[in-house]
Structures are given as structure tokens and as C-alpha cells.
Amino acid sequence: MTGTRETPEAHGMVADAPPDNWVDRYAPLPWRPYLRLARADRPIGTWLLLIPCWWSLALAAAHDAPRWSDLWIAIACAIGAFLMRGAGCTWNDITDRKIDAAVARTRSRPIPSGQVSVKQALGFLIAQVAISAAILLTFNWAAILLGIAALIPVAIYPFAKRFTWWPQAFLGIAFNWGALMGWVAHSGSLHPAPVILYLSGIVWTLYYDTIYAHQDKEDDALIGVKSTARLFGENSAQWLGGFLIATVSLMTIAVLWALLPGASPLVLILALCAPWAMGWHMLWQMRELDIDAPETCLRLFRANRDTGLIAALFFAAAAIA
């Protein structure tokens, strides 16, 4: 008798999820399709959504003074990032279900593979947004209004790849909203520093999501999906180098705008270490990058969790110094 080798997809697993992830190993069976839909089996997106919140909150605390309420803001941002990343992915998969079915890496996702219906996905989306809204209501009114406004880029992003070669810019606009939220939740008002920090985060997203998009460039070309990976092609290294420099430069300006004058030398030095340490980590990624090796692109994309956390740790040290 000839046996057939079962693939992970045969068990409902998603092709590009990390092996032995907690959803596939420990989550109750009825929950797994929904947790996969929310990308809980791939937490990198939650980290990339959360990290700009923590940057901004810590920089705001360094700007004036940390408060006990900042602890709740940090925790609430983490819970909110998990939920809103899940909601965004659910919305993305609803709108992209036909495209996902045509791409090898994504056809195993819950909707195109038939694990979850569109109606069920919509119900799950509403539940995630509702819980996120309850958390948002614990913030000040300025942060609540800003949080509501965040739904606009989240709703637009899935369609960007259809009409622009720069969908990664739209992802950056949505994913780095926390760079505004953290500051406003702490202080109750906006300031030029978090706006510049937000721009730095957008450029960082262009950097890491261009690397990510190189995994799908062949399938994207076949079905007509646009991306910066396809736009830049063999010139990607030069563009990524430019994004690296812009990320570091804008974050440096944000730090100086937030902390000069008035900050102690120690606080200023610690905060300035954030963009430069982040830049060195991005430079390491570029040295490792092979745009024609999908496994390498995915590994380096995931490494950006550490890139962002390095900056967050220096900002946190500056806040409590």
C-alpha cells in the first residue's frame, strides 16, 4: 500500500505559520480557525502594531514624567494591538479571499480553505472591534477620538494593492497609529514629536514589509497585485538603505524635538540610543538579505520585532532615568 504524506494544511494549519505555534498545539479545536484568522499563530504582526505605541508612550513619559496610569496604557495597548491586529487581518482576509486562494502561501488561510465562512468572519470581526472599543473607552477623550480615526486606514489598506504600487505605505499609516496614540493617551494632546515618530514608523514599515513582499512577488505578478517589492525589483537594496537612513533620521529628530531643551544628559543619551541601535539591527538585516530566498525574507521580516523592541527598551530606560 502506498502512503501519502499529510501536509500541515491537511490539518487546517496555515502554510506560513511558525512550526509548533501555540494555536496549532494547544488551542481548543473549535477556536483554531478563528485564532488563525486573527493571525494569533503568527504574533509578529501584533508586535509590529504594538511597538510604536510603546515608543510613543515611553517618549511622552521621558518628555514630562512617567505616571502610574502609563502602566495601564501600556497593558491596554498590548491587548488592543492583539485584538485590532486580529480585526485588521480578519477584514483583510474577507476582502482578499479570492486573491489569497490564488497565492500558494495564502490559500491555506481559514477563509479560502473553507475553515471559516465569510458570515462567520464578519461576526468575529465585529466581536474583536467591540472588545477593542471597550478598552479604548478607558482612555482620555483625545485618545478615544484618535482611536476611532484609526479605523479609516485600517479599512482602506486591504484595497491599496489594487490601485497603487505602494500598499506598504498604507500599511505603515495603519500600523504605526500607535505612535500617535501612546503620546495622546499619556498627555491628552498631540505634539510634533509623536507626529515625526509616526513618520519614522511608516518608513520602517516600508522597510520591513518590502522584505516581506519579496516572498510573493512571483504570484503577485501573475495575478496583478502591486507591491514595493515588485516596484523596486533588483534595486530593492538601495531603497531599503534609504528607508533605513530615513527611519533613523526621523526618529532622532522626534527624540530631539521631545526632549530639547530640558531633558537631562542621561535621558537624552538613552533616548538617542533608540534610533541608532535600531538602525544597526536594520543594517544587519540588509547584510543577511537575499530577495530571491523566501525563507530568508520571512526570517528577516520576523526579526523586526527585535528591531522595534530595541528602540522601545531605550525609550523606556530614558523614561525612568
Image (cartoon, helix red, strand yellow):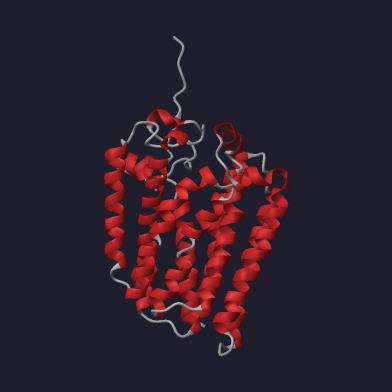
Q: In front here: 11 or 231?
A: 231
Q: In this view of the protein, can residue 137 be seen by the observer? A: yes
Q: Quadrant of the N terminus?
A: top left
- Residue at the far front in the pictured view: 163
Question: Which residue does the image show at 43% across and 34% down from the upper left?
Answer: 98
Question: Which residue does the image show at 43% across and 44% down from the upper left?
Answer: 21
Q: In front here: 68 or 26?
A: 68
Question: Which residue does the image show at 55% across and 39% down from the upper left?
Answer: 225
Q: Position of residue 87 (x, y in %)?
A: 36, 51
Q: In the shown orientation, is residue 200 left or right of residue 101?
A: right
Q: In front here: 22 or 242?
A: 242
Q: In front here: 226 or 18?
A: 226
Q: Is residue 255 above or below residue 221?
A: below
Using the rendered view, name the quadrant where residue 272 is placed.
bottom right
Q: Is residue 234 above or below residue 49?
A: above
- Residue at the far top in the pictured view: 1
Using the rendered view, name the quadrant where residue 97 is placed.
top left
Q: Position of residue 38 (x, y in %)?
A: 37, 47
Q: Position of residue 233 (x, y in %)?
A: 69, 43
